Amino acid sequence: MEEKSVRQENIMGTKPVNQLLVGMAVPIMLSMLVQALYNIVDSIFVSMVSEAALTAVSLVFPVQNLMIAVGVGTAVGINAVLSRRLGEKNYEAAEKVANNGIFITVLSYIAFAVFGIVGSRPLLAVMTTNTQVAEMGAQYMFICTVLSFGMFMQITVERILQVTGKTVYQMCSQLTGAIVNIILDPIMIFGLLGCPKMGVAGAALATVIGQFCGMFVGLAINHVKNHEVRLNLRGFKPEGRIIRSIYQVGLPSIIMQSISSVMTFGMNQILIGFTETAVAVFGVYFKLQSFVFMPVFGVTNALVPIVGYNYGAQQKTRILQTIKLACIMSVSIMAIGTLIFQLAPDLLMAMFQASDAMKQIGGYALRLISLSFILAGVDIVFSSMFQAMGDGVKSLMMSAVRQLVVLLPCAYLFSLTGELNAVWLSFLAAELVSFALGIIFFRKIYRRTISRLPN
């Protein structure tokens, strides 16, 4: 009886939207800020080894981004389908979604582990002719892929907590992984407290150990605190229908985020034609911008289950209120990020032991790229809203147009001028086109779906 009562009082459909979105988003934002902080700290420690080490880690970033794309994209599909089943009060179906989600998460890990074993050295050999950079990059990539089980599982169990509004507990999982990583980084990179000095390999090991710790905390919290969705694989059999429904939303999200890996790889190849320092700057930019974008992703991570639940429950007003508030919060965060990048680019670059050449390239890059941040904040909200309503194709199209149709071709064309600074203009051009496309898609989905829901 008690469990049934808990299930009937899902806050997604009852709590005032302003309180609900802010209450769910703030813990996620805080945990993601810590996540971004440890990404930055990780690169700061690596930059103390050498600029070559920082370049090596930057070259591996597309592969890491691809793993995150598959993990997060799959979790987005689980989240969207799970929230709709809970909105429909179909708890048995919701639990089957969660269990099938765990199954495909394990399959994703196995695929990347095999890829890491077979492809680490050949891929780095293609990316750079600098043997020192290639060797460090191969070590880093091998560890991050082969031991990525903790990362995949952590992402999935956190999203299952998130879908029932338990974002404070999700924060505990993320904070655990981040804090462990930050503590272990200097110990394993520089050989402190009796640990052997491992350099770039130590940074990779610190990362995966933190991910495993976060996974264990997330699993424990799900078992103890999550009464609405039970994770129980005893007697489990995969169900093709459920897996297809997860990937109907998740696959466009995976492809959408994987496009970022393709873009990063392409940009690295364009930039390395100028200098390896430009690649290091691009890597630093991604670490720094995560400190701005992660809180926005915290907002949209909260938006997805709220919109998904209320779409399943046919609550038009709550959907629109959530989208409006998410846009306001995202734009405000992006405006603060833009100011920081405009006013203190040299200070930001100095954190990474930047040489004079690296500061000069980085200062111009940070100022120019950050002009696109506010538009990006709205784009991210639209993209997440499309996913929550089961129309992930629109999110995919926005991302593909932004990064493959506009950004990379523009970067290549601008590079033909021989001016490195011109390449950074491609980010602003891409965001303008993506913003226009997002507005068009929102108007369509509003007319065809949202406006027809009961008030």
Image: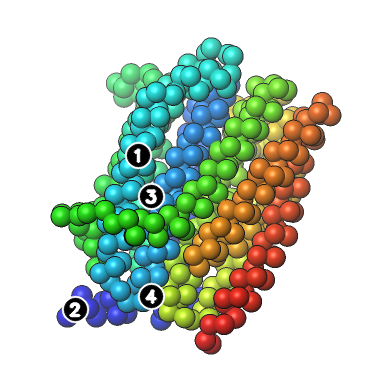
Which is more toward the observer, 115 or 349?
115
The amino acid on which the numbered mark 1 sits, given as a three-letter code, is: Tyr
Residue sitting at 70 percent across and 65 percent down? Answer: 440
Between discs 1 and 4, the one toward the N terminus? 4
Badge 2 vs badge 1, beta-carbon distance below 8 Å? no
- Give the SS element for disc 3: helix
The quarter of the image holding the N terminus is bottom left
The amino acid on which the numbered mark 2 sits, given as a three-letter code, is: Glu
Mark toward the viewer: 4 or 3: 4
How far from the left and from the top, in percent, is residue 163? 38, 65
Decide if residue 102 is on the left or right side of residue 428: left
How far from the left and from the top, in percent, is residue 326? 57, 67
Give the labeled residue for mark 4.
87
Residue sitting at 50 percent across and 39 percent down? Answer: 65
Question: Which numbered marker is on residue 155?
Answer: 3
- Give the SS element for disc 2: helix
Find the distance from the CA under tag 2 to the CA under tag 4: 19 Å
Question: Which numbered marker is on residue 383?
Answer: none
Q: Quadrant of residue 138?
A: top left
Between discs 4 and 3, the one toward the N terminus? 4
Give the labeled residue for mark 2.
2
Residue reaching furthest to the front: 240
Find the distance from the CA under tag 1 to the CA under tag 4: 30 Å
Between discs 2 and 1, the one toward the N terminus? 2
Give the labeled residue for mark 1.
109
Residue reaching furthest to the bottom: 455
